Image (spheres, coloured by chain):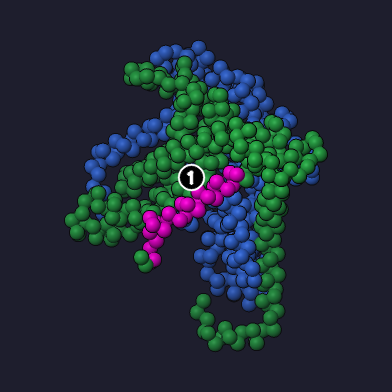
Chain colours: A green, B blue
Amino acid sequence: MGMHPNQQAIAPKVQPGFRIRKETIYGYGMAAPAILGFFIFTLGPLLASLYLSFTDYSITNDFRFIGIENFRRLFSGEDSFFYKSLFVTLYYVALAVPVSLLAAFAMALLLKNNVKGKAFFRAVFYLPSIVPVVATSTIFMWLLNPDIGLFNQILEFLHLPTSQWIYDESTVVPTMAFMNVWSVGGTMLIFLAGLESIPDHYYEAVEIDGGGIRHKLTAVTLPMMTPTIFFNLIIGIINGFQSFSEAYIMTEGGPNNASLFYVVYLYREAFTNQRMGAACAIAWVLFAIIMLLSVIVFRSSRSWVYYEGEKS
Amino acid sequence: MTAKHRFGVPRLLLYLLLACGSAAFILPLAWMVRSALMDASQIFIVPPVWVPEPIRFGNFKTALDTVPFGRYLINTMIIVVGNVTGAVLTSALCAYSFSRLRWRGRDFFFGLLMAGMMLPFAVTLIPTFLGWRTVVGPNSYLPLILPAWFGGGAFNIFLIRQFMKTIPKELDEAALVDGAGYFHIFVRVIFPLSKSAVIVVALFQFLGVWNDFLGPLVYVNKESMFTLALGLQQFVGYYTAQWELLMAAATMILIPPILLFVIGQKYFIKGIAVSGIKG
């Protein structure tokens, strides 16, 4: 700013406050869409959802306040799909998040090496992530077709055992986690940006000390990348828990509810069974789980995330 | 860049890995195009044939004749244009206020918006749906368009704000001295200077709306009002065995995003890099 402290102190006396008030009015006025939007489309629905979760609301009937009945019903296991979907989703997140982060990180590391044709490879890796999810699902249903799909044909050609992929209870979730790797382009680009912001002289220091590739990776790359890994981990968990479209389109939660992702279950309760109140309770449990996991990751981050400029 | 062999990985191995990786990433798309251009009988040959013989463009026409994708394209474009326009205009306006005007409560409200981004969409989905149902009834595009006019999403505001913060403050001050109002400064000075951030937002928003599946699924159930995504999903349900038609339809729906990516590649890469910096 370059403003002299004295100038700042006398400024209000010189100006009768008119400019400042005008700036405030314009400030609120121009931010009004977002502020109103926050109240209308975030806070309002959030509170309404909390309220509805204690009712038996279902579009067609009048509704009553039923206390914690919705939650009791979920946790008591009366609605067996609740624990089923929770398990399916945890299983998916536990597989998909680490696998996707590792794949994205590996791809970013490859591209970081000043390769020729970097822009081309980067585009190829990123491209699948902009394919509409309906198209992705359609393409994979074709690739994963047990009888004539390409994947099984390749496996047969290599004399390896084939798989039922998304059409078998035991393989559907791992298959979807593996499918998810195809769309990690965005994560890869974030890693790449992080890698490219590491100053060269850090690596040079390792070289001078006689360190090799392993030292560069463990002493420079990994510590410097922890904030980016942390960011991608949080986003990955949040998105993983909310996976919906792939399962809804490809398996509708099947076979035998083996891919009943949490949000697919929520959607089914809300829009197929018209149990809106119960669905709100289901949503709040999801909210609590995501918050809890985020807090755990945030807490743990103190011991493994390295921020530059922070004294440790 | 002086250090060429940063990690000292043998070059040959590096390119081998890159080649295998990109082949694996291209494979599903290549397989899709190949299947879309094939005769129904050729598609089932074992072992698989890679190059269609003859190349059949008829599948695209058959797909278009079977499902009114033309209608769905128009529907999708109505939502895209309405939504993206609102998102771009209002997110830039709000970003201007949050980055270049000083007002009491500014940082508080910005923090609120950022916190709201962490909220799972599933939590607000049902009350929002019920609200729209009460206000405009079922089968309306308004729920898919109007929210974008309220700031266009916290992430877009964040992205443009980051960019606007880099524009020298002296520009506003000079304009103020010349007697220009804040709105005038936004329209004439700051918005044009933020062009590249605005393009990033427009591209991402376009993709988001074009690819959106859950939104139309929840708000639209009349077939004549379907979007392309809904149309393709329904098509998958009806014609499970006619893979050449399904692949032709899938190819058509992803041509616009891919064209957009090819044209605006540098904006995509810049935009995503910004989103990571926040971490």
Kindly identify the residue that appears in the image at 28 percent across and 61 percent down. A201
Q: Is residue B23 above or below residue B193?
A: above
Is residue A307 covered in magenta? yes
- Please tell me in which quadrant of the rendered image residue B198 appears: bottom right
Q: Amino acid at mark 1?
A: Gly
Q: Count neighbours of disc 1 (C-alpha within 10 A) and say few if under 14, some if 14 to 19, many if 20 or more.
A: some
Kindly identify the residue that appears in the image at 45 percent across and 31 percent down. A174
Q: Main SS of the magenta segment?
A: helix
Kindly identify the residue that appears in the image at 41 percent across and 39 percent down. A99
Q: Position of residue B174 (x, y in %)?
A: 59, 75
Which residue occupies the foreground of this view, B35 or A132?
Answer: A132
Is B77 left or right of B170, judged from the image as shown? right
Q: Quadrant of the C terminus of chain A?
A: bottom left
Q: Is residue A83 above or below residue A23?
A: above
Q: Chain of mark 1?
A: A
Q: Position of residue A71 (x, y in %)?
A: 65, 42
Kindly identify the residue that appears in the image at 43 percent across and 47 percent down. A189
The answer to whether residue A272 is visible is yes
Specify the farthest residue to the left: A210
Q: Position of residue B259 (x, y in %)?
A: 52, 39
- Please tell me in which quadrant of the rendered image residue B30 appears: top left
The answer to whether residue B206 is visible is no
Q: Is residue B211 above or below residue B84?
A: above
Is residue B251 covered in magenta? no
Range shown magenta: A285-310
Is A36 left or right of A216, judged from the image as shown? right
Instruction: Name the element at disc 1.
Output: helix
Q: Which residue is mark 1?
A: A236
Which residue occupies the foreground of this view, A290 or B31?
Answer: A290
Counting every numbered tag in the picture gives 1
